[in-house]
Image (spheres, rainbow, N blue to C red):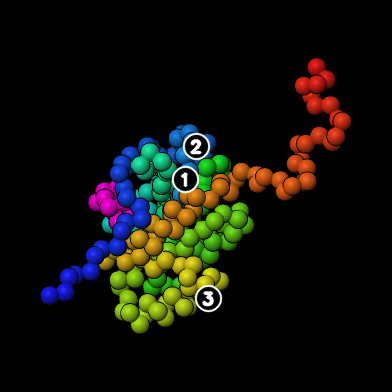
Amino acid sequence: MSQPPKPEPDPLVIRSLEFIGGMAKPDGWRPPPELPEVAFAGRSNVGKSSLLNRLVHRKKMARVSNTPGRTREINFFKVNDAFMLVDLPGYGYARASKEARASWRPLIESYLKASPELRGIVQLLDARHDPTVDDSQMLDFLAELEIPTVVVLTKIDKLSSRERKERLVHLSATIGLDEEQIVAFSAVTNAGRNELAEAILGLLQQPSWKKPQAAAPGEMKQDDTSPGEATPDETL
């Protein structure tokens, strides 16, 4: 009698998970940027909370709400005392108040521009639909800032096998990425969970996109002094 196939080893074993707190406004509290961070972005009804819960093998890491747009803070979760997963507010929920919609963009933009330990973004798109105007603006914004980005197509369990292949080809062409650069994911069946975990580990191994790169050999940094020029300390 043949043995059932062994499950794939988990590339991201969750040993500890701690909710640190929420950032409610651009100049508000946030945890000290001491650990590498990977942030998750997407429309309010894209399935971000379900994805996060499946990723960390928890049922209630991120609240799953029947009403999109409930998450209005940037929530920080410490994983294995080694890095942060950051849940950005869902954007684009039409029935949210005008004031709420207006507050989310500055909050997200403030976080992205002022997080020195940010390693990259996981951008979620609904596999069943073309990117919305909000999705396209977010992708353009990430490209403008040159933030490393992993694109995940959610809710693939709602598509047939043929439809999945067609949507992957279409969406990859729409957003200008190779199919291999996109993770197809289902929070219901767990499809794509390990691929996403590996992509996140890859982001965490990268240097912070905010930190200046080391100068090439023989290249002078902007704050270097020329040979023989006194430094400020030498003139004291």
Up the image or down, 82 lies above or below 91; here it is above
Q: Which residue is mark 3?
A: 173
Q: Which residue is mark 1?
A: 37
Q: CA distance from mark 2 to mark 1?
A: 8 Å
User: Circle 1 sits in a helix, a strand or a loop, which is it?
Assistant: strand
* Circle 3: residue type: Ala
Q: Are marks 2 and 3 in contact (CB under 8 Å)?
A: no
What amino acid is labelled 2 in the image?
Pro
- Is mark 2 in CB contact (under 8 Å) with mark 1? yes
Mark number displayed over residue 26: none
- Number of residues whose C-alpha sits closer than 10 Å to that of mark 2, classed few (under 14), some (14–19) or many (20 or more): few
Read off the residue under disc 2.
33
Q: Position of residue 70 (x, y in %)?
A: 35, 50
Q: Residue furthest top?
A: 236
Residue at image point 19% right, 70% down: 4
- Tag 1: amino acid: Glu
